[in-house]
Amino acid sequence: MVAVDADRPDRTALREPAAALRDGGLVAFPTETVYGLGADATSVRAVRRIFAAKGRPADNPLIVHVASPDHAWALVATVTPLARALAAEHWPGPLTLVLDAAELPAETTGGLTTVGVRIPAHPVALALLEEAGVPVAAPSANLSGRPSPTTAAHVLDDLGDVVDWVVDGGPARVGVESTVVDARGRRPVVLREGGIPREVLAAHDREPSAPTSPAEPHRSPGTRYAHYQPRCRVDIAPQGAAVRRSAELAAAGLRVGLVAPHPAPTGVRQVARPDSTPALAALLFTALREAEAAGVDVVVVEAVPEEGLGRAVMDRLRRAAAD
Ligand code: TXA
Ligand code: MG
């Protein structure tokens, strides 16, 4: 493991992890969303190691991370005007653009003809990517099905035995993953909710008069699988109802944790007290892991309005709570 300053990372400290990436190694690194488990996207062997380490289904494609738009465009067959516009506005940032892929291993693209590319908004990730000089395929650095990691400690808990390097750049700022957008057409199609709200992307819709599509016409392959689940139950309470709900569960004899903007009642453990939707996004995965570590039977999380970043938060929460 190597720890670097989140804002001004020491380049020399990143040389060895960068060399490991070029040599086919597995390197976990911070991004603004969550920690990624990186490997050379052009190396079949390196990418296979990612799937083996995570226990990830082979048909779930990886996002390829690069440090500049030119490096991103080198990975795709066609750069659409929509992709250029979205990149100009949101890169570096929590936005993954899905485009027709150029030559890339089928292991990286999950056998699809498209590829997801993104430039992360994190000085450590950018420095590492520049230093490595190869495109880096990186899913979230958790075991498949577990909450995504927002600190280096989470990565070590899940994958400490199998990674070659963990670059510690402090806690992830956004806390939910990138928004995945199909940018092949004239309008952005959201495949996974994430750090850039859907409402923000609507400004790029060039076909306002097109027939409205069903609510969820397409989804990313990864959204099909069980995900984000800690080893305790997750209970979503409507806004304003979490405290009472947690008290009821405690009265029924359960060990209960609470994630809500209000103080926990007697007999309930306060796991986190987020006072806004961005605050909940930033600490949600940490809170799920802390609830699990505290040995609670159930963690009650208070819902947030399903708008803006709240869409991504509620998506993660529902899948954490699913059976
Ligand atoms: O913020 C993030 O996106 C983080 C950081 C590390 O960059 N990465 C991440 O990767 O969340 P992962 O593998 O945990 O989730 C990637 C999601 C999956 O749902 C996958 O199916 C989808 O993106 N995806 C990747 N490439 C795709 C493609 N070509 N078409 C459709 N969906 C794609
Ligand atoms: Mg993931």
Image: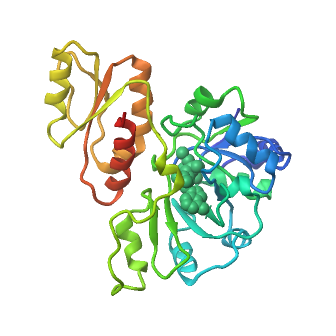
Q: Is residue 27 visible?
A: no
Measured as percent of width and height from the top left, residue 81 is found at: 56, 84
* Quarter assignment of residue 270: top left
Figure quadrant of residue 208: bottom left
Of residues 219 and 84, the one drawn nearer to the viewer in this rendering: 219
Q: Quadrant of ligand 1?
A: bottom right
Q: Is residue 280 above or below residue 248?
A: below
Residue 63 x/y as whole percent? 62, 56
Q: Identify which residue is drawn at 33% across, 82% down.
A: 211
- Residue 121 versus residue 4: which sits nearer the camera? 121
Q: Quadrant of the C terminus?
A: top left
Residue 154, x across and y down, in percent? 55, 31
In the rendered structure, the answer to whether residue 1 lies left or right of residue 214 reads right
Q: Is the residue 16 above or below the residue 231 in the image?
A: below
- Asked whether residue 225 is in view, the answer is yes
Is residue 50 placed above or below 40 in the rendered structure? above
The percent coordinates of residue 36 (x first, y second) are 61, 45
- Please give left or right for residue 75 compared with residue 282 in the image: right
Query: Is 64 left, or right, of 132 in this rendering?
Result: left
